[in-house]
Amino acid sequence: MGKLITIYVDNKPYQVEEGQTIMSALDKIGYHIPRLCYHPKLSIEGACRVCIVEVEGMKNYVASCAYPISDGMRIKTNTTELRRARRDIVELILDNHPEDCHTCERDGICELQRLAYAMGIRNRHFSGEKKQYEKDLSSVSVIRVPNKCVLCGRCVRVCSEMQNVFNLTYAYRGFKTVVSTAFDLPLSESVCSTCGQCVNVCPTAAFLEKNYTQELFEKLQDKSLIKIVQFAPSVRAAIGEAFGFPPGTSKEKETVAALRKLGFDYVFDTQFGADLTIMEEASELLERLKNNGKLPMITSCSAAWMKFVEQFYPEFLDNISTCKSPMSMLGAMIKTYFAQKMNIDPKKILSVAVMCCTAKKYEAARPELLIEGMPAVDIVITTRELAWMIKSAGIDFVNIEPEEFDEPLGISSGGGAIFGATGGVMESAIRTAYELYTGEPLMEIEINEIRGFKGIKEGIIDFGDFKINVVVAHGLGNASIILERVKREPNKYHFIEIMGCPGGCIGGGGQPYAGENAIPLDEELLKKRAEALYGIDRKKTIRRAHNNPAIRRLYKEFLEKPLSEKAHKLLHTHYSPKLPVGIIPKELTLR
Amino acid sequence: MEQSILTEKEKLNLLKEYLEQFKDIPRAESNLIMILHKIQDIYGYLDIKALEEVGNILRIPTSHIWGVATFYRHFKLRKPGKHIISVCLGTACYIKGANEIFLTLKDELKIGKLGVSEDGFFSLEEARCLGACSLAPVIMIDGKIYGNLTTKNVLQIIKEIRKKEEKKQ
């Protein structure tokens, strides 16, 4: 702990630690200065000037997010002039912002709207020139609406500081400043990983997921189709937030019930797909270890990570597990195994996935993942889109009677549930690989060294006659730090888990927006979502993927055994380098 | 000045040679502005291929390069048109309706965001006083001053330039 110094806030003395900004000191003693561009996980921009305070002896108001405290400093936070100045600043930010709140996707869940309310803007005194940009609808995952942008720069910072993708920049200047990609390329032709973190941190609707809800509503009316849906572990851990439940409330069976009410014939669980992924991936790991295969093996479940590796680190493509993601594996099983079993023409199946992720939209459209010419998943919607559909359809999610998943592709182990939190894939894979190799069940199945929210987590797993070194990273920035490390020391690790988003899928780009008292990417919120998944795992009697009876039946009736020829055809794939080539700058920092 | 006698390959080699000095120094991106000037010297504008090369060689994300390149008016982001039109927006010309002339030309020549006409034939630039205020409003095309303009006769001048070009071909 640093030295304590005294500051006076509105004439009251407080002891605070030195070496911090005014905002961070005030946050700890019961104040919350209004703010917009500030984000605790990102560098300080000082762009919006909303967080001004008065400091005695200073000619002008200072931005509290950027100004350091000093001993004896006298700060005023709440004078009439100050409140008026903050209100004027927000009003000027609104000045060239479209006035279309009721038709905006973020109506009611917009930080700018909340800020305008809190500042007491009841009249618009200024009305200036509006920005006129075309929407960028090129990407299948993320769309860009520059007219809504207030230039807070959070997207630019999250993309470069947290994700190391560096796709976004401020281009041009003055009134013409716009957040853009290199050479103003459309997102679909850029290095965008489609992770959707820009959507998460945007205070307005300048970044959004590509919305497929209308198309889905229409298809749900089509009587000739068999409508099948799956949803990801992290969806159940977060969807409640969109209906006012506190973060960390698991809404698994309620989601099943709501999906049936929306018109789906079968509701399956992506956790079954996760169990299947583990069977294949654990077998692949053992195979690589035994037969001197390419190591370290790196997980391939995260769709944003896969696009990132193709553009930024194509030299590691042979290290990537050939396993498809749980969503794509389950999609493949729905259109083959399940269709056969039920005697349905797979062309008549509408395969839908509800994901915590914007990148899964990109994954579903990948030609590498077609099953006999058909996409394994036809439509992907995010947690946010599903929450909206439930509201729009008039379903009472708050009081809904819980329902069970359909069999057989709705049965899952606890190992499938924890996939959504960083470290979960690794943990689940080890539970299975250990038993496949030693023949004994792993006793300590909760592997604490790879749980939690540290950017990079290392562990050593003892398999009896050998040990394997594992490492887990979440967020693409941390992923690139690990890959740079592997470049220098190729033999350091055997098995690497990488998730594209901070916290893993629970922090995905498709999750509900931060509520009234929360901030996007808040670690406490992510912890609660993770805890919901660990809770589901603990409550399951079956916690290891290979003990899932439906998985066993699937292998007996259809796939024969892990890594069989059929499994290879349906559950594995190969990725290839893509353009434009991504550039990682020389100096990397750990976040 | 554009070194137009050089082939694309020669231009690229010139650039690569120049970039050598920055390869192994820390924070190479702090030399970006100097590098952008060099590209404009070699190519006459900031060629995208050249910017990508800078990114790859010095490991600077291209978005960052684009952010710097678009910030400064000096840098041309597109190959300039064959004919350069400068419209004087100085006080005297402005009062005499230079802005209308600018907008007319912008419309007529279909000038894009980067200041070059759709057909790549004309560049349209703003100028601050060309020193011919008595003729206001004035424009300069390829170094020659045209004065006493209206939104009508300025289009006539453009037509004549186009006619001359057609004859040449």
Image: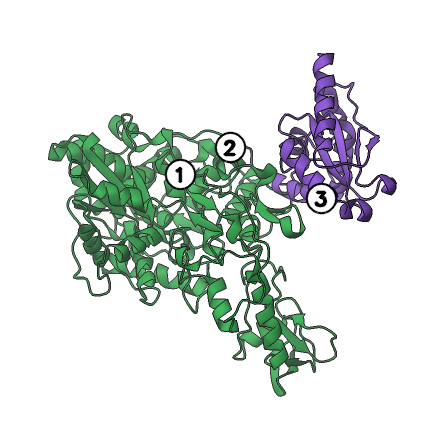
Residue marked by disc 1: A362
Point out the frontmost of discs 1 and 3: 3
Q: Quadrant of the C terminus of chain A?
A: bottom right
**Element under label 3?**
helix
* Colour-to-chain, green: A
Point out the frontmost of discs 3 and 2: 3
Query: How many angstroms separate mark 3 from mark 2 (CA)?
Result: 51 Å
- Chain of residue at mark 1: A
Q: Residue at x 74, y 13 (%)?
A: B168
* Residue A491 x/y as whole percent: 51, 39
* Residue A407 x/y as whole percent: 15, 45
The disc label shown at residue B99, or none: 3
* Colour-to-chain, purple: B
- Chain of residue at mark 3: B
Residue marked by disc 2: A314
Say few, some or many: other residues with alpha carbon within 10 Å of mark 2 (under 14 / 14 to 19 / 20 or more): some
Return the residue nearer the eye: B131 or A483.
B131
**Element under label 2?**
helix
Q: Is residue A40 left or right of residue A173?
A: left
- Chain of residue at mark 2: A
